[in-house]
Image (cartoon, rainbow, N blue to C red):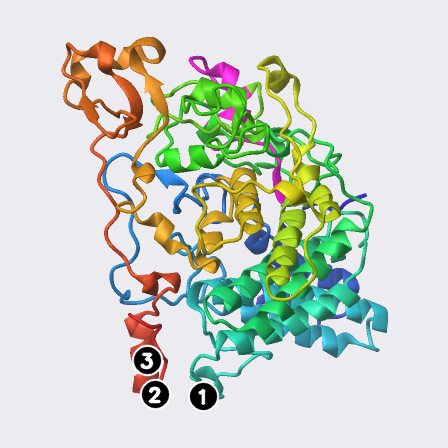
Amino acid sequence: MKKHILIIFSAVALLTSSCSGFLDRPSLTTMDDGNYWTSENNLRLFANGFYQNYFVGYNSAWGVDYAPLRGYYFSDDFTSAGKQAGFETQAPASRAATSETAAWLTTYAGPTWNFAWVRKSNLFLERIDGMKGKYITDAVHQHWSAVARFFRGYEYSRLVSVFGDVQYYDKVVGDTETDLLFKDRDSRTVVMDKVYDDFDYVLTNMRLTDGDNQYLNRYIAAGFISRFMLFEGTWQKYHLNNTDKAKKYLEMAVRAADIVMNSGRYTFTSDFRSLFGSQDLASNKEVLMYRKYDAALSVTHHVASYSNLTESQSPSTNLKVIKEFIARDGKPYKLSTVPNADKLDIKSLVATRDPRFEATFWDAPMKEASTMLYACKFIDRVGVTYYGKTYPAMYGSNTNTNAAPIMRLAEVVLNWIEAKAELATMGGTAVSQTDLDKSINAIRNRPLDATAIAKGVQKTAPMQIGSVPNDPDRDPDVPALLWEIRRERRMEFIFEHTRLLDIKRWKKINYMNTTTNPDLMLGPWVNFPVEFTEWLVPAKVNKLKVQKADGTVVTYTGTNAADMVGFYIPENISGRDPFTDRVYLAPLGITQISQYTDKGYTLTQNPGW
């Protein structure tokens, strides 16, 4: 049986102040650090405090941080009406936070300058060490040390992905340890080598199973380790040209993924839509970990309501993404022999593309989406049938209860196959057909649900190592196999956590340049006289625009309805402001740098800022 997230993330806040109160009795509602660390159960309770920070799922209520669709909306996957969201243009006045609930940075898909969780994991580890031999056995100590080290490695992986170099601490630093508190940043390679050591310990010492199937285990940890090591391995390769470190981290990504893939616990038995819209994922064998929601306990979210066809989606998906979805013969649309694969209207796309297209998007243009392509990936098939009616609580407002996958097998196998393919470019073993069958082809062989079958959707043909498509739009510096692996990630994880981080680690942030990538400024092909006559009205005169295949732009005049056929141009759209490679890393706050200077220390700013 697989592990899953508790319905309620039990959090125990560490209070280091002394307890005082009526008759000097100890508090019954807060923990006393002096006598708390006496049992494994207390370790478990303290560890639960990490869960809500790291295993966010669909967040809760109106929360958007680290939530798919509602939080991860800044990448080349998304286009809005009006001006396109841009990168930072200058270093902020302040970037730091000390709260455990500090907000994330949307344009970097990671945390702000905050070491609260590093400190918390170090404190946890020190307290666990203090219990060894007195309150817990060696085996118990090994497991909980692995849990604490996993969370420390998780936090440093996120900080490094945003800021690059960061200060590394492997202990709780006291207020009087000024040289440590104000030391300059350590290089990302030094930090990630420490993270590597933590993860190496985790993969050996964390329990395979833990208690009643509600807690972190080695398989779940291994899935995340494959993610973080893939990120750092490819960053080392493409940004730092450090082949030795790239191999080291990528080999751990493969090793971690192997633990999951060789366990026999997980398999692809679910249709794609059910991974995101189901009320319960306990029996889904593709899901390693999930977050369960329960209205009776007031544990709900709002991601499904923004997939229900009524709530607006801005930004939404652009023509560039549409063109990335392969046809069901496994080929890019320009190479495909599937009839009508070259047509880029929504109905043709549903009929000709990989099943994930139909499972992700509504099958007709929708005014609620800024590009007219509406995503309904995060709601079940029933929820969308309430369009134009009153939605039950589970599909509306912030009272949604569909379960959120936290870590799933598809990510593990795609991390695995990409790491293997990258290693092959650096002298490693070539990717084999067996490798493809265990990863990409296993994903493509997922079952289809009844709705998809009724629409004529078909499974995508397996990839053959001897005939990997050579996409005419492929970047010349990316081998064909890696290009197709990257495409697979884009289809699989759209609206999830990966895209901005992927193009950053591949050193492809130029994909977000709207001048050199004009398809970012367009939606699908729409035949307004046939598909969407409700916009052929006086209110849309001089506002509604389409672009013909030859690039000609046609504006609706009120008398040219028949000519309003082409790629939809979102209203009042304008491109993203220019940016440079400095945006790969976030700038530190001016206040934080000044604080170091005032103390006689130096805090180095990131390049270009």
Image: magenta residue range: 383-406
Q: Are marks 3 and 1 in contact (CB under 8 Å)?
A: no
Residue 532: quarter of image: top left
Horizontal side, residue 286 vs residue 184: left or right? right
**Residue 490 x, y percent position in the rendering:** 51, 42
**Residue 350 x, y percent position in the rendering:** 51, 22
Mark 1 Cα within 10 Å, few/some/many (few <14, many 20+)?
few
Query: Compared with residue 213, is residue 113 higher up or lower down, i.e. above or below?
Result: below
Amino acid type assigned to the residue bearing label 1 in the image? Thr
Q: What residue is disc 1 on?
A: 178
> Residue at 80% of width from left, 51% of height from top?
262
Residue 13 within the segment the image draws in magenta:
no
Residue 169: quarter of image: bottom right
Identify the mark at residue 599; answer none if there is no mark: 2
Query: Compared with residue 155, is residue 460 higher up or lower down, i.e. above or below?
Result: above
Horizontal side, residue 409 vs residue 540: left or right? right
Secondary structure, mark 1, is helix
Point out the tag, 1 or 2, that comes first from the N-terminus. 1
Q: Are marks 1 and 2 in contact (CB under 8 Å)?
A: yes
Amino acid type assigned to the residue bearing label 3 in the image? Gln
Point out the tag, 3 or 1, that comes first from the N-terminus. 1
Secondary structure, mark 2, is loop
**Residue 197 x, y percent position in the rendering:** 67, 74
Q: What residue is disc 3 on?
A: 595
Rounded to the nearest whole Å, what is the CA distance between mark 1 and mark 2? 9 Å
